[in-house]
């Protein structure tokens, strides 16, 4: 049984760049530079986490299952929430830019004989139709870029969500006080690169609570609280 849509890929590292093609999926073909970092992170470390974020568990428990047809895990990584969502009876879509994350998601959902769809894509340009998704989760993803990319990502989520659709996400809170023992470099306002570790050179934008209200214009903010990892957990609804 093949529940996960197949993807194939083609590495051409001769010029230090990688081109990936996912012919059977919603087309995604691009050359990338920065995102190689996520792929090397996934190649170097075991699964990021095997259990779902507790806020996602609560979010899903409170969703009205019969009217929630399509859930998107934005920045699905190596699949912990896809597996959880599929176990709850959904057929989620997972989007991520990291081929190695998608490969590992694929292996995991296939092993569990679950149903999901994997798409290679960027959060700032989602390969999905407008108003086609009932709920979006995105755990520790949208802050891994500069502010203009984050603004585009939020506006893309707004575009693809149905009216009244919900968006649950977590992002780190400004200032980066949890980074006391991390060597990092400031690269823009509220934006830092760790200089070591798996997330080396991957941008991290830290959010001020007030600015989230501005960034989320057009959404109704239902909930905002700290999670256990010093991230802000935010639940919004499209009006
Ligand atoms: C910290 S991991 C979190 C993975 C997953 N959400 C979880 O909770 O286990 C961040 C993920 O976001 C993805 N990501 C970061 N920036 C992205 C972008 N601009 N477009 C698509 N995916 C992105 C990375 O490839 C990585 O898989």
Image (cartoon, rainbow, N blue to C red):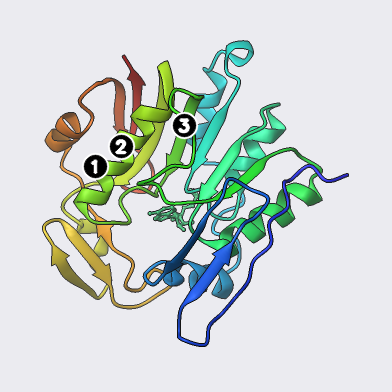
Q: Is residue 17 above or below residue 138?
A: below
What is the spatial separation of the Cα atoms under label 2 and label 1, in whole angstroms?
Answer: 5 Å
Per the image, the residue denoted by label 3 is 136
Q: Circle 3 — which element?
A: strand
Residue 189 rendering spot, x and y as whole percentages: 11, 57
Label 1: how many Cα within 10 Å (few below 14, some 14–19, many 20+)? some
The answer to which quarter of the image holds residue 179 is bottom left
Q: Are marks 3 and 2 in contact (CB under 8 Å)?
A: no
Q: Are marks 2 and 1 in contact (CB under 8 Å)?
A: yes
Label 3: how many Cα within 10 Å (few below 14, some 14–19, many 20+)? many
Q: Circle 2 — which element?
A: helix
Mark closer to the chain start, 3 or 2: 3
What is the spatial separation of the Cα atoms under label 3 and label 1, in whole angstroms?
Answer: 16 Å
Of residue 128 and residue 69, the one placed in the foreground of this image is: 128
Q: On the rendered image, what quadrant is the C terminus found in?
A: top left
| Left or right: 41, with 177 as reference point | right
Q: How many marks?
A: 3
Per the image, the residue denoted by label 1 is 151
Per the image, the residue denoted by label 2 is 154
The residue that appears at 42% across and 25% down in the rendered structure is 161
Please indicate, yes or no, whether residue 231 appears anywhere in the rendered image: no
Of residue 186 and residue 130, the one placed in the foreground of this image is: 130
Of residue 30 and residue 121, the one placed in the foreground of this image is: 30
Q: Is residue 219 above or below residue 142?
A: above
Q: Is residue 57 above or below residue 206?
A: above
The residue sitting at the bottom extreme is: 14
Q: On the rendered image, what quadrant is the N terminus found in?
A: top right
The residue that appears at 55% across and 29% down in the rendered structure is 71
The residue that appears at 45% across and 71% down in the rendered structure is 36
């Amino acid at each position: 049984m093949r529940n996960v849509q197949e993807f194939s890929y083609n590495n051409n590292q001769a010029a230090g760049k990688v081109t990936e093609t996912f012919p059977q999926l919603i087309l995604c073909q691009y050359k990338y530079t920065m995102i190689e970092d996520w792929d090397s992170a996934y190649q170097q470390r075991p699964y990021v986490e095997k259990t779902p974020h507790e806020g996602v568990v609560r979010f899903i428990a409170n969703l009205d299952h019969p009217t929630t047809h399509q859930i998107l895990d934005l920045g699905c990584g190596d699949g912990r929430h896809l597996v959880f969502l599929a176990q709850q009876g959904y057929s989620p879509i997972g989007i991520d830019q990291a081929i190695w994350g998608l490969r590992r998601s694929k292996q995991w959902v296939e092993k569990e004989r679950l149903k999901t769809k994997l798409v290679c894509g960027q959060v700032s340009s989602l390969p999905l139709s407008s108003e086609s998704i009932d709920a979006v989760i995105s755990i520790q993803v949208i802050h891994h870029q500069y502010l203009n990319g984050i603004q585009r990502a939020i506006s893309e989520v707004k575009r693809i969500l149905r009216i009244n659709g919900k968006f649950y996400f977590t992002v780190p809170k400004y200032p980066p006080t949890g980074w006391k023992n991390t060597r990092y470099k400031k690269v823009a306002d509220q934006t830092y690169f760790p200089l070591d570790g798996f997330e080396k050179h991957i941008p991290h934008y830290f959010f001020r609570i007030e600015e989230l209200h501005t960034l989320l214009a057009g959404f109704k903010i239902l909930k905002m609280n700290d999670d256990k990892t010093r991230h802000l957990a935010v639940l919004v609804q499209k009006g």
